[in-house]
Amino acid sequence: MKGIIYIRVSSDEQVEGTSLEHQEESCRRYCQQKGIEIVELFREEGESAKDLSLNNRKAFLRALEFCRKQKGNVQAFIVLRVDRFARNTEDHFAVRKLLLDYGTTLHSVTEPIGNKPAEKFIETVLAGAAEYENAIRKQRCTDGMSKKIDQGLWPWRSPAGYTSALTKQRGEKKTVPDAPDEKVFSIIQRGLKEYAKGNCSQAELMKLLDEWGLKAARGKKTLPQFVDRILGVHLKFYAGILHNPFTREEKQGLHTPMITKEDMHQIQAIRAGKAGRLGVKKDRFNPAFPLRKTVVCASCSRPYTGGFSRGRNDTYPYYHCHNRTCVMYGKGIPKEKLEQEFLKHLEALTPRQNFLALLKETVIDVWKEKGQLFEEHAQQYEKQLAELEAKRKRVFEMREDGSYSPDEFRERKGEVESEIAAVKISLSESRIEQFDIEGVLTYATNFISNLGRQWFDLAPTLRPRFQKLLFPEGLPYDRAHGFRTAKLGLVFEINQACLGEKSQLVDSLRNSWNQIIEELQAWQGFMTAHSNTTTTGA
């Protein structure tokens, strides 16, 4: 008789002890006594036995797969106890039946289980006892954690901004709340308060946190997911509130809060789109200040905002930097001055007619070249697909004439269908989107040949979109020196780099072909929106 041994511990702390070694020794002794030849050993280190999910029982699934592939050649699956196998009765008998289909019987070294009525009864009791023990342990753990929350202590690791006492690793119970982290606490606190005031967006907050030292303190760049957590799942904790996930009740924590409950409610309202700065919803498209959010401060890279300053007899519109820590804070720029300079800047960036004509000609040439290459690839994939479909048909025919057994049929059918799926994906990717490239180029070149006039004629709601296409990262402005160098849309970057030579333009387009097509499509969508707005207005 041949068999495999499966040994497991349910936590990382047990791996370094004798549990695995003891299990292996006992299982090998059992095999020797029963005359079972060991063909494989599967060792599960530090994985939970609560369920049989793929992530928790990798070695277990390898053992099952081994029995499936060696169907009829592995007669015994040896474990120390049935609770090493599973702690869920339903899982236990489902997998036991699967093993029997493979010709494999479950053996417990320490328990009298088997296929006789009395042995089956004992196995059922033992599997149920394992599940019951697991449920009791879970309930005790849950009750203990719930009690800690009632006492004002967070039983788990506190979120960023607090230092974990790591009492569990030392085998101790948590009796005091986690203290503020000297390096991180004040940075996150500052960010939360700025966001609550409506002074920054979530994306801007991410950059600000790193500018204030969070990246250096944590040793890694702040990601959008981190900002989403501090503004979402961790927000109540930062306001001093502990949410009990077991009872759904809330308790006042003993830890030092970062923000007030009013700040918390304001942040929640902003994220829900119900409030902005001082509880007033912001107007994204303020027609009075069309350059707001596009022009950024050259000193701190924060977007300029707009507002009115009250004089003795009238109010006067100004753009200004609202970052209180910036040297330019409070130094307004007259609206008329900035917008006139912006129009002059657009005129300087406007491509000349000779470049636009060359661009149109070159894009069409490269488009045809690329299209031909993609079509060749598509034809190759279509040929492969036809061959695979024919192969799939033959697999079914071989099943019908008895050449394949049911298992062989399923195996071959699965292999061919996987290949078909992969080729279909490649075929789809090789098909570039077909649209009227000449029409788009004609419309686009006519539109961008007079940027200043087009910006002036745009509806207020379309100006930010236009400016984003032209200045994807914003346009820096210095109060003393005017506009600084900014990253431009690809068409305008190529315009500045091109010296009027077609060969140079062809190389630029080939190196950034996907990006130029995406930009042309973006301009096409924008121009459609502009036409619809103009028609509606008319």
Image (tube, rainbow, N blue to C red):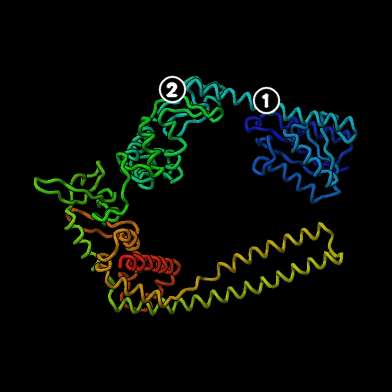
Q: Position of residue 60 (x, y in %)?
A: 72, 41
Q: Secondary structure at mark 1?
A: helix
Image quarter hosting the N terminus: top right
Q: How far apart are the alpha carbons under marks 1 and 2?
A: 29 Å
Q: Position of residue 285 (x, y in %)?
A: 30, 54
Q: Mark 2: few, some, or many residues within 10 Å (few <14, many ≥20)?
A: some
Pointer 1: what residue?
136
156 sits to left or right of 43: left
Given residues 110 and 448, the one toward you in this image is 448
162 sits to left or right of 376: left
Q: Amino acid at mark 1?
A: Ile
Residue 209 occupies which quadrant of the picture? top left
Pointer 2: what residue?
254
Residue drawn at (59%, 73%) of the image: 378
Q: Position of residue 274 (x, y in %)?
A: 37, 42
Given residues 272 and 95, the one toward you in this image is 272
327 sits to left or right of 423: left
Q: Amino acid at mark 2?
A: Leu
Image quarter hosting the C terminus: bottom left
Residue 503 occupies which quadrant of the picture? bottom left
Q: Secondary structure at mark 2?
A: loop
Residue drawn at (62%, 71%) of the image: 381
Residue drawn at (47%, 79%) of the image: 368
Given residues 265 and 165, the one toward you in this image is 265
N-terminal-most mark, 1 or 2:
1
Q: Which mark is residue 161?
A: none
Q: Position of residue 9 (x, y in %)?
A: 69, 33
Whether 72 is drawn above or below 445: the answer is above
Whether 172 is drawn above or below 504: the answer is above
